[in-house]
Image: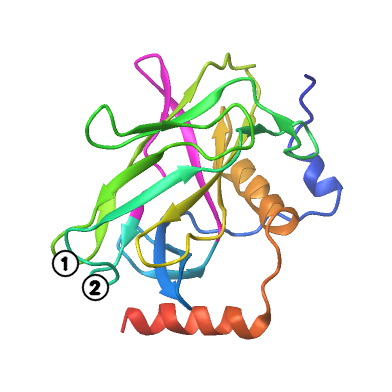
């Protein structure tokens, strides 16, 4: 597939924002898990359904430790389990969108070898990866994200993972997205992240957005 340089996004009128990298966090609002973004030190960056990471060569594997998953103490029940699962096949940027299903897959691992999931070949739910909640009712973990079965083209490439969280007693989170870059700069990755924000994520009602943002801010006071 011919790769179109990501600078074509700017030509199409999509500006590159100053998006902050960050870990995935969660709130429980209205009986549902809601994804938010936090810095590595836990400072809130607001509601978000798009996150990002860069694959790097690690002993022959295309690996990323970002994004991490960071839940504030008191959010969940100590000793319970948070689960993450993929909900669509891996997509690859085709120069204008993520309509193309990638030839490879992304795996996510945490803890024991058996606690590993793989993006499915079709748009179906994968098995779940389990994150034990610590004694304070939160967690801070960094899964191993690995790009499997893909031969790099040598140019910048981008992949889109769709996933959801589940937790007993509440509704699963809405789908959230992780944009992974390969042979890409952080600036290019931010442009693609903004494209996903603009073209994939539905715009929430302003009242709901403000309510969630206010809750996220209060949790850090």
User: Residue at the spot x=48%, y=78% of the render?
Assistant: 30
In terms of sequence position, does the residue under pointer 1 or pointer 2 come before the other? 2
Image vertical order of residue 157 relative to residue 131, above or below: above
Q: Are marks 1 and 2 in contact (CB under 8 Å)?
A: yes
User: Residue at the spot x=37%, y=85% of the render?
Assistant: 218
Alpha carbon of mark 1 to alpha carbon of mark 2: how far?
A: 6 Å
Residue 36 showing in the rendered view: yes
The residue to which callout 2 is attached is: 74
Q: Residue furthest front?
A: 169
Image spot of residue 121 (x, y percent): 60, 26
Residue 67 showing in the rendered view: no
Image spot of residue 123 (x, y percent): 64, 37
Badge 2 crowding class, 10 Å Cα cut-off, few under 14, some 14 to 19, many 20 or more, is some
Give the structural element (helix, strand or loop) at label 1.
loop
Give the structural element (helix, strand or loop) at label 2.
loop
For the residue pair 78 and 215, the one nearer the viewer reads as 78
For the residue pair 56 and 30, the one nearer the viewer reads as 30
Magenta stretch: residue 215 in it? no
- The answer to whether residue 80 is left or right of residue 5 is left
For the residue pair 52 and 174, the one nearer the viewer reads as 174
Residue 116's disc is none
Start and end of the magenta stretch? 49-69
User: Residue at the spot x=31%, y=84% of the render?
Assistant: 221
Number of callouts: 2
- In which quadrant of the rendered view does residue 130 lie? top left
- The answer to whether residue 78 is left or right of residue 182 is left
Secondary structure mainly formed by the magenta segment: strand
- In which quadrant of the rendered view does residue 85 lie? top left
Residue 136's disc is 1
Badge 1 crowding class, 10 Å Cα cut-off, few under 14, some 14 to 19, many 20 or more, is some
């Amino acid at each position: 597939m011919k790769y179109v340089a990501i600078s074509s996004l700017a030509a199409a009128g999509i500006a590159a924002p100053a998006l902050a990298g960050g870990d995935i966090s969660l709130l429980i609002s209205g009986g549902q898990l809601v994804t938010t973004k936090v810095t590595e030190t836990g400072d809130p960056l607001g509601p978000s359904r798009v996150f990002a990471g860069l694959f790097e060569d690690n002993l022959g594997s295309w690996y990323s430790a970002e994004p991490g998953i960071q839940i504030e103490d008191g959010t969940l029940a100590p000793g319970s389990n948070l689960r993450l699962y993929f909900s669509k096949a891996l997509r690859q940027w085709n120069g204008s969108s993520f309509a193309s299903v990638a030839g490879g897959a992304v795996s996510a691992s945490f803890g024991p070898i058996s606690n590993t999931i793989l993006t499915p070949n079709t748009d179906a739910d994968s098995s779940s990866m389990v994150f034990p909640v610590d004694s304070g009712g939160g967690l801070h973990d960094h899964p191993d994200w690995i790009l499997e079965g893909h031969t790099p083209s040598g140019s910048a490439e981008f992949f889109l993972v769709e996933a959801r969280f589940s937790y007993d007693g509440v509704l699963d989170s809405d789908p959230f997205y992780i944009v992974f870059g390969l042979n890409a700069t952080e600036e290019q990755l931010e442009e693609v992240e903004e494209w996903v924000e603009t073209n994939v994520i539905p715009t929430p009602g302003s009242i709901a957005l403000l309510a969630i943002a206010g809750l996220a801010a209060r949790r850090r006071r």
